[in-house]
Amino acid sequence: MWLSLLALLAGSLFFLYSLKYYLATLSMLVSSLVLANGNGRANGNRNASGQGHPHGLMRFLRRRNGNGNRNGNGNGHFDLGYEPFVSIHVATYNEKRVIARLLEGCAALEYKNYEVVVVDDSTDETAEILAAWKRRKRFKIVHRPNREGFKGGALQMALQHTDPKAEFVIVWDADVVPFADSIQTYLPHFFKQNGNGNANGAAKSPPEARPEVAAVQSYQWHVLNKSESWLTEAVRAEYAGSYMVERPFQEAVGSLKMIAGTAYMIRAGVLRELGWGRSLTEDWELTLRLYARGYKVVYTPYAETPAECAATFGRLARQRMRWAEGHSYNVRRNFGAIMGSRNIGLVEKLEFLFYTTYYLQSALFIVGSACWLIAEVFLRAHVPEWTATLGWSLLLTNLLSLPLMNLAGLLLEEAPVKDFPGVLGALATSFLLIPFQGYAALKGFFEKDEGPWYRTPKTGRITDPVHHLRRLVWLRRWLRGPGPRSRRRDQRLKAGPSPGPRRGSRPEAAPIRDRSRA
């Protein structure tokens, strides 16, 4: 009976997560289809220059962010009337396999008013690679003699070397390869567009700032080496569910959204005001400090940032243990401040409560399922008034929630068919990580100080060509029949001397590894 009670308790707690995932999945799929088809039939989804935007999810998030009217360049940008100065910050530690391609990508950005600040504390050949960039225009290479404060400490030093006229800061991890228009995909979310575009695509009135928005989080699009193994396919599918379903749903309902340190833009003034902490999860720590002061974080999947998946299970486990420990540690330290803050709304506080046991979800599922199976199958006992049918239904409902969300994420993203088996891999990986994440999460709740930082090594391998996310044309055709096609032209990662397309790759998709041409 005690096993049955424990099963009911753990299963019910996980069911709260499952309910959220089901609701998010249904909401994102329905809103994408309804808005895409409804607006397309009403006005052809045409903007000032005739570019189509049939992607309902894009429209849904634009409305939520107050960016319902944009000009007609077809890429989701609008003209601010000037180019705010943007400082790109990169913290590097032994990134010899990937740092050169990131810097080449930064040099090829289609934006005039920016700088790149790299703070390096490497012990390998990374310093020699960076030496070649010291005299390059826009680039500042800073070496520090130790790893004090780890990534947070390095970013604090980058902040000290930032140009005073910088209005915004982008933080990118070393394995990122940006699109040429990456800066332009972040900026619109800090503003409201007033008035419709005219025939030349210009706004009737200048955009209005949204001072409450401190940061814009992009899609950590881990697709560069997604075909390397079943594990990278699994990680890729997991991120699709999180970033194409869960996070857009958070944006839609106005809940608390976590900054993820791989790729985001933040107001430079806010960052100067707050400074950087030294946590293992400096991004989560920054998130909580922002919300406690009344700021908001905006999410968009269409500032997508290609990056690598962890390539081995050992690296993945180390990475998730660091995340789990730092996450729980900061939840404990900030719980009272967040729950008692008048600057944070009820929905945001509920989301924070969901985040408290975020890295214990799978453990709750395993404990609840195991206890139910033992009690029901072997001991023939269950809680009075709680029938076997209800128990099995709860187990099945919990089991399917994450796979369905990941599957929906891949559908919304119009991922190739070969990516879909990764949904099963993601399910298996979530179980395999339970002892590692569970231990680290519990450790973070009780330890006095956080443990050491373990870097996740990058391989530098690229297995798949990458282009901007599409606008749900395929999904809409599949579910609702043919409709008006998007004329949006994908901006591809620009290439240097190309060895030619990979065998079996689509001719319109340029291999990401060859993107040095400006």
Image (cartoon, helix red, strand yellow):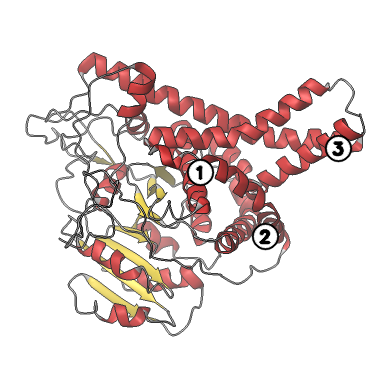
Dot label at residue 374? 3
Query: Which residue lies most toward the bottom here?
Result: 145
Provide the residue designation for mark 2.
440
Helix, strand or loop status at disc 1: helix
- Number of the front mark, 1 or 3: 1
Q: Residue 268, can we see it? A: no
Q: Position of residue 399 (x, y in %)?
A: 66, 34
Q: Is 132 placed above or below 176 here?
A: below
Q: Amino acid at mark 2?
A: Ala
Cβ atoms at labels 1 and 3 below 8 Å apart: no
How many numbered marks have been drawn onto this rendered protein structure?
Answer: 3
Left or right: where 268 falls relative to 340: left
- Number of the front mark, 2 or 3: 3
Q: Position of residue 341 (x, y in %)?
A: 57, 45
**Which residue is at the front of the view, 209 or 85?**
85
Query: Which residue lies most toward the left here?
Result: 200
Q: Amino acid at mark 1?
A: Gly
